[in-house]
């Protein structure tokens, strides 16, 4: 199975980075409600286990917020594997913007 993996370095510290990530995820759910459904996530310490449907595809993964980096990874459905590079670049761009 294909997968995605993105790490972004930041200088915010774990608490500030997690706060930004939490607000961002709320914004994404609101702004992209037409494309995303069944969004669910659970924080366990600094790790968010998440899943959602995006245009009918089930997406899941984990986001780990650390003192100096945020890492997102998970499996990709076969239909999305062809877009892996674009998906990873979009995640990287959004996290870089968010954590700058």
Image: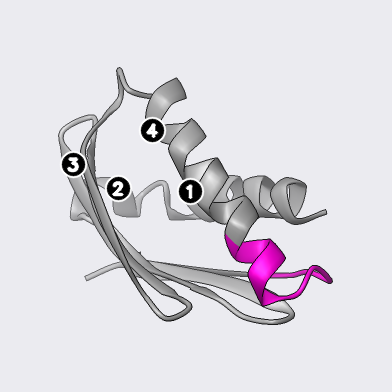
Residue contact at pointers 3 and 2, CB within 8 angstroms: yes
Q: Is residue 75 visible?
A: no
Q: Residue at x 65, y 53 (%)?
A: 95
Identify the mark at residue 29; answer none if there is no mark. 4
Q: Is residue 96 magenta?
A: no
Residue contact at pointers 4 and 1, CB within 8 angstroms: no
Which residue occupies the foreground of this view, 19 or 29? Answer: 19
Are there few (<14), some (14-19), or many (20+) residues within 10 Å of tag 4?
some
Identify the mark at residue 57; answer none if there is no mark. 3
Sequence-first disc among 4 and 1: 4
Locate residue 71: give its quadrant: bottom right
Q: Residue at x 61, y 71 (%)?
A: 70
Q: Is residue 10 visible?
A: yes
Question: What's the distance in space between the residues labelled 3 and 4, CA to CA?
Answer: 16 Å
Q: Is residue 12 magenta?
A: yes
- Residue mark closest to the camera, 3 vs 2: 3
Residue contact at pointers 3 and 1, CB within 8 angstroms: no
Sequence-first disc among 3 and 2: 3
Sequence-first disc among 3 and 4: 4
Identify the mark at residue 87; answer none if there is no mark. 1
Residue 81: x percent and y percent? 32, 54
Question: What's the distance in space between the residues labelled 3 and 2, CA to CA?
Answer: 8 Å
- Residue mark closest to the camera, 4 vs 1: 4
Question: What's the distance in space between the residues labelled 4 and 1, CA to CA?
Answer: 17 Å
Which residue occupies the foreground of this view, 77 or 21? Answer: 21
Question: What's the distance in space between the residues labelled 3 and 1, CA to CA?
Answer: 14 Å
Please state the extent of the stretch shown in magenta in the rendering: 8-18
- The residue indicated by pointer 2 is 80
């Amino acid at each position: 199975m294909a997968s995605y993996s993105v790490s972004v370095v930041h200088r915010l510290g774990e608490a500030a980075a997690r706060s930004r990530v939490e607000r961002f995820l709320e914004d994404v759910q609101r702004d992209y409600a037409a494309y995303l459904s069944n969004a669910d996530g659970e924080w366990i310490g600094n790790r968010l286990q998440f899943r959602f449907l995006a245009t009918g595809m089930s997406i899941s993964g984990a986001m780990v917020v650390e003192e100096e980096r945020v890492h997102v990874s998970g499996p990709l459905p076969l239909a999305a594997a062809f877009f892996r590079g674009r998906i990873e670049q979009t995640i990287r761009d959004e996290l870089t913007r968010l954590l700058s």
